[in-house]
Image (cartoon, rainbow, N blue to C red):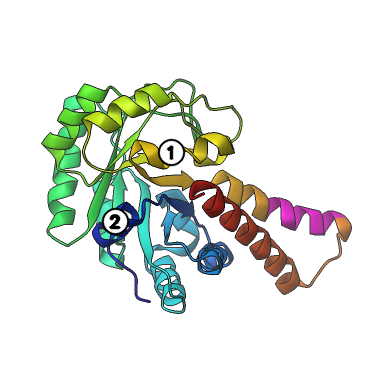
Amino acid sequence: MPLVNMESFLQLLEEKNLIAPAFNTTNLEMTLAIIQGAEEIGFPVIVQITPTNIKLSGYDYIAHIVKSAAEKVNIPVTLHLDHGMTFEDIKQAVDAGFNSVMIDASKLPYEENIKFTREVVEYCHERGVSVEAELGELGGKEDDHETDESAQTDPMLAREFVERTGIDLLAVSVGNIHGLDEQPKINLELLREIADTVEIPLVIHGGSGIPEDILAQLKNYNIRKINIASDLRKRFISSIGRRYEQNPNEYNLISVLLEAQSGVKEVVIDKLSTLNR
């Protein structure tokens, strides 16, 4: 089916009490694995990409791949820009047909974060595009950026932030961490307080390292989107690495990439099953 806008997508999740993993893609093989895995298990899915990963494909190319793949399946698929840092990132994603964007101004002082985020919201809402923003900051490593310390989300500031910016989704920091180098310690008490204070859907970044027993509980805390990147990338890279170790003279690139794609698809199915038990 055609790509669906994020507003309709979120309404569907709410009606069915589901969490949609937002799987980060980088290339054709990962994109197909994400959508095919979701189709096989019958769950809606978010495909997303960061500006750093768009360097490989460009906004238009990755948007075309996702749109084409979505039209061949019978599940809702939506396309999201993850961690847009500049207005130019946002504009390029909107122009390419992305359904929603994240503006990450969390490193700015609070008032500057609100001002910049509000400008993005006004621009995107005029064009029918939903906006996610972040309050608080995650530790760990996101692509080439590494943060040693995290700042957890303040529930009262979160409510004010949502009211003053008009965002559609709020990414929160409650002990979640980017990457797989550290073990996250999710503060469910804080997450409950934020969920009781903020009316819009919440987002968890750094979903790859969160234990399965915690993942299975998150939809009870108004979490509707959870970002998963490192698990997919690790499976893709390790699959190719194993093939090289088995045969350094391997030349059958199609076989190698299909095996890597199949591995990513397995991760997608596993995460979807865990989140929506």
Q: Amino acid at mark 2?
A: Ser
Give the position of the N terminus as an image quadrant: bottom left
Q: Element at badge 1?
A: helix
Residue range highlighted in magenta: 237-245
> Residue, x 80% and y 70% (percent of image)?
251
Q: Amino acid at mark 1?
A: Leu
Report the residue marked by disc 1: 218
Q: Position of residue 86 (x, y in %)?
A: 28, 45
Q: Position of residue 15 (x, y in %)?
A: 30, 56
> Residue, x 22% and y 47% (percent of image)?
168
> Residue, x 18% and y 36% (percent of image)?
162
Report the residue marked by disc 2: 100
Q: Does residue 125 lie above or below 218 as drawn?
A: below
Q: Nearer the viewer, mark 2 or mark 1?
A: 1
Observer-nearest residue: 154 or 249?
A: 154
Give the tally of numbered discs: 2
Compute the Cα span from label 2 to label 1. 22 Å
Q: Position of residue 53 (x, y in %)?
A: 48, 53
Q: Does residue 10 lie above or below 209 as drawn?
A: below
- Mark 1 crowdedness (10 Å alpha carbons): few <14, some 14-19, many ≥20: many
Q: Element at badge 2?
A: strand
Residue 130: quadrant of the picture: bottom left
Answer yes or no: is residue 204 visible. Answer: no
